Image (cartoon, helix red, strand yellow):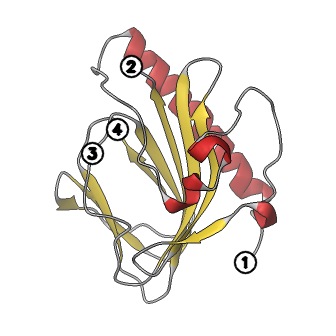
């Protein structure tokens, strides 16, 4: 497994900043009612301190080679990066997933947090409210708005690798 390039890391950080701005704007305009933002505990986030929370009040570098890898029920794996609430009040969670060909990470679902999915390798089909979109591949970014039903399937013939960055306000 290769480490992320500077370009990939900068794209991920820019996406996180954009999501924080979107969440803040939506809340300020009271555009989307928010309910509970707690993310489900996953095998990957369970390995983080305090059962899933990571201190978010100090800047740091997350060394890819040091992030714990945990198996998923679908034959893939997850690599937790961060999971917690920022000092400014937004919940943030980031993880990498390896999704085997023909598999879904989980059934279609919805939640109050906003997500960006950054595709590193493979080809995935993303569905919005049950409508499949054109497959996404390396370098593509999937945006999921708050409370929108969505799902994803690996439609390629090799594993898909992607990062998920999730942001929302704690209620």
Indicate the position of residue 36 as horizontal and vertical percent values. Answer: 34, 29
| Residue in the image at 78% along x and 51% along y | 62
Comes first in the chain, label 2 or label 3:
2
Say if 47 sits above or below 98 in the image.
above
Q: Secondary structure at mark 4?
A: loop
Task: State the CA–CA distance, disc 4 to disc 2.
Answer: 11 Å
Task: State the CA–CA distance, disc 2 to disc 3.
Answer: 17 Å
Residue 140 in sight in this render: no
Q: Is residue 167 left or right of residue 30?
A: right
Comes first in the chain, label 1 or label 3:
1
Neighbours of disc 4 within 10 Å: few (<14), some (14-19), many (20+): many
According to the image, label 2 marks what residue?
A: 26
Comes first in the chain, label 1 or label 4:
1
Indicate the position of residue 21 as horizontal and vertical percent values. Answer: 53, 24
According to the image, label 3 marks what residue?
A: 110
Indicate the position of residue 82 as horizontal and vertical percent values. Answer: 64, 45
Foreground residue, 119 or 70? 70
Say if 171 sits above or below 136 in the image.
above
Task: State the CA–CA distance, disc 1 to disc 3.
Answer: 31 Å
Q: Secondary structure at mark 1?
A: loop
Q: Name the mark on residue 143.
A: none
Say if 129 sits above or below 86 in the image.
below
Foreground: disc 1 or disc 4: 1
According to the image, label 4 marks what residue?
A: 145
Indicate the position of residue 60 as horizontal and vertical percent values. Answer: 83, 40
According to the image, label 1 marks what residue?
A: 1
Q: Secondary structure at mark 2?
A: helix
């Amino acid at each position: 497994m290769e480490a992320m390039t500077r370009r990939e890391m900068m794209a991920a950080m820019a996406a996180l900043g954009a999501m924080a701005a979107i969440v803040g704007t939506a809340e300020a305009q009271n555009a989307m009612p928010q309910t509970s933002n707690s993310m489900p505990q996953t095998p990957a986030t369970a390995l983080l301190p305090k059962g899933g929370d990571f201190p978010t009040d100090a800047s740091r570098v997350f060394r890819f080679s040091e992030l714990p890898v945990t198996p998923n029920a679908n034959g893939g794996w997850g690599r937790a990066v961060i999971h917690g609430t920022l000092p400014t009040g937004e919940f943030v969670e980031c993880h990498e997933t390896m999704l085997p060909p023909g598999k879904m990470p989980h059934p279609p679902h919805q939640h109050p947090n906003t997500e960006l999915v950054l595709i590193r390798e493979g080809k995935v089909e993303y569905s919005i409210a049950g409508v499949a979109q054109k497959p996404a591949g390396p370098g593509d970014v999937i945006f999921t708005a708050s409370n929108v039903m969505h799902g994803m399937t690996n439609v390629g013939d090799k594993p898909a690798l992607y990062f998920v960055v999730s942001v929302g306000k704690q209620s």
